[in-house]
Image: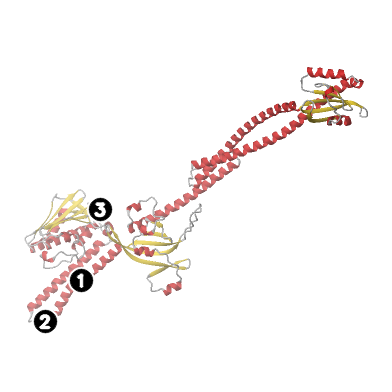
Amino acid sequence: MKKGAAKFREGFFWKLFLGHAMLVLLAMVACLGVATVLFDRLLDEQLTNSLLAHAALLEQQTAAEFQNGDATRLDQRFKQWAKENPNGIRITLIRADGEVVAESTVHPALMESHAEREEIKQALQSGLGQSTRWSNTVNRDMKYVALRVGSGDEPIGVVRVSLPVQRIIAQAGATRNFVWMIAGLILVIAIALALGLAKLCTGPVARMAIAAQELSKGRLSTEAVAEGSDELAVLGHSLNRMRDHLRSQLATITHQRDYLQHLLARLHEGVLVANASGRIVLLNPAAAQQLGIPEPILVDDQGFEGMAIEACVRQPELRELLVIKKLTTASDRLEESDAQHGFAEADGRQLEIDEKQVTIPRTDGCATVLARAVDVDLPEAPAPIDGKGSASVNSGRLLVLTDITDLQRTIQVKTDFAANASHELRTPLSAIRTAIETLATMNLREEVDDAAHFMDIIDRHSHRMDKLVTDLLDVSSAESVTKQYDTESIDVSSFLVELDSSFAGRADAKEVAFRAESRQGDFSLTANRYLLTLAVDNLVDNAIKFTEAGGKVQVTAAEACDGVEISVEDTGCGISLEEQERIFERFYQVDQARSGSTLRGTGLGLSIVRHAVAGMRGSIDLGSELGRGTTICITIPNGEQRNTDPRKRGDATNSTA
């Protein structure tokens, strides 16, 4: 920038300086030429007048003697005067017939007739004659002025005064040298003035050029210096107004861009826009995350704009969706009604919307994305100012990516839940229906023992159905997002006493030692009694169910820094590492061969526990060793609790082996 500005300043300076210098030089040459001509003319006139004055004076002084014929005295007087006045002036006295009678430098007898001399003939005719010519007498160029003596009708002769041309030239040369000296001084002064004027003019212009270059590069902090009221000041004010206008427009564009980027960054859906040349125009962070773009590309300062689609989108199905389609009319839509796509209105036209479900592998597993693509009209970008390249195309493709992994998982969970619930209900119903059909064909009086057996089947399976329905209701209640659970202060010791009385009979019937106690005496817990009872009851029920005769189940409660810990420990069959990851799933049951129970569970108990603890914002820790027993500890924060959706909070289970 500085180099270009300096180059501009130097170029403009020399142009302006040389222009002024040439103009001054031409003016000086023209003036000197005219002055020289005028000087030569003036000098010639002055010499002529001077010689004429000498001739007139001599004519007055010598007229009488010349008329009396006293030529010898005149000749002597002329020579004496030439000695006394060595100014180079030569005096000649000539009769009317051309004979030389007196001469200041040469003896008259040695001179030829001057009757044919031009100045002599002019003087005899008009009274005055002058000429410049070569003199054979003195062998040099002479300037002659002749004056007639006597009347025009009867002239006596001519008095001629002459001066060597070399002397005239010498006098003119000295004068010219003086004139050239003055002209040189004037030229130096003029060049200095031109130099100062060039600097004075190029300084503001160079500053304007620098300001314009800075503005053209987008540096809107540059201010053009505008002083005075001349044209440069007007230009500076105009540049400053243009800068302010550009700054305002840029601020508006920046605000709109930041607003758009903020909105796109807040979107959970991924948005990708590509142009017809296969280049990315827009890609928001959600799309980058869903597409699994590597970290080096994400931190690239250049962003995604201008990148090839292949560099960002690695899934062939998504690349296919980014191929620009043509706008389709309503009639075309009817003809392609069997195609698997939708349509949207756009300016009275039908836009073809393509949809695909794409599975994208990630480091944490596979994600399912619903991709929808449609043709869009992009704002047409102007051609580059430098003329290189061409204007960009104005058609593109919009791709919207919606992560439906959780939705798919939820649908699958609901499907599995319905299937599992149907299966679990169908099993006891089938047994009851079979038993009833068998009883209907039996002779109850004769087959009393067999009838009692089938009645026992009906009783057991009806209890199983009742338990299953109860557990399903508990799961539904624990998972309820909208239901609010009020909290209350619960005396932990009293709660454990009630728990002991509730399960003591069932534990004794199975010959399992059961005990519930507090390690720290009396203390209270602020929580929802229904959720707490639901969680602990299911844990104790599972512990007794999977503990063989002679084993023990112990419930202990203690205060912790982050709430109250209630642990249920048994000496039952234990849970393998593989099963520990799934026991909190609905309807999942451990191997019945290790349970020691003659009645299968519903597989919903631990799922109920998980959701009940999550509803109290608590956590679960699991520790189990196959063949030695299981310990499950739940931690409940001591404070006001409200029911929250465990799906939004994440799984409350923290399993450890």
Q: Which residue is mark 2?
A: 442
Disc 1 target residue: 423
Q: Along the horizontal axis of the image, is 55 left or right of 168?
A: right
In the image, residue 528 lies at what x, y percent? Answer: 22, 57
Residue type, numbered disc 1: His
- Relative height, residue 502 to residue 17 (above, below): below
Q: Which residue is mark 3?
A: 640
Rendered image coloring scheme: secondary structure
Quadrant assignment for the C terminus:
bottom left
Q: How far apart are the two marked residues, 3 and 2, measured between alpha carbons?
A: 60 Å
Residue 547 in sight in this render: yes
Q: As rendered, which of 456 and 90 lies closer to the eye?
A: 90
Quadrant in the rendering for residue 554: bottom left
Q: Residue furthest front?
A: 110
Identity of the residue drawn at 52% across and 46% down: 243
- Helix, strand or loop at mark 2: loop
**Please, what is the three-letter code of the amino acid marked with disc 3?**
Glu
Q: Is residue 224 at least partly visible in the picture?
A: no
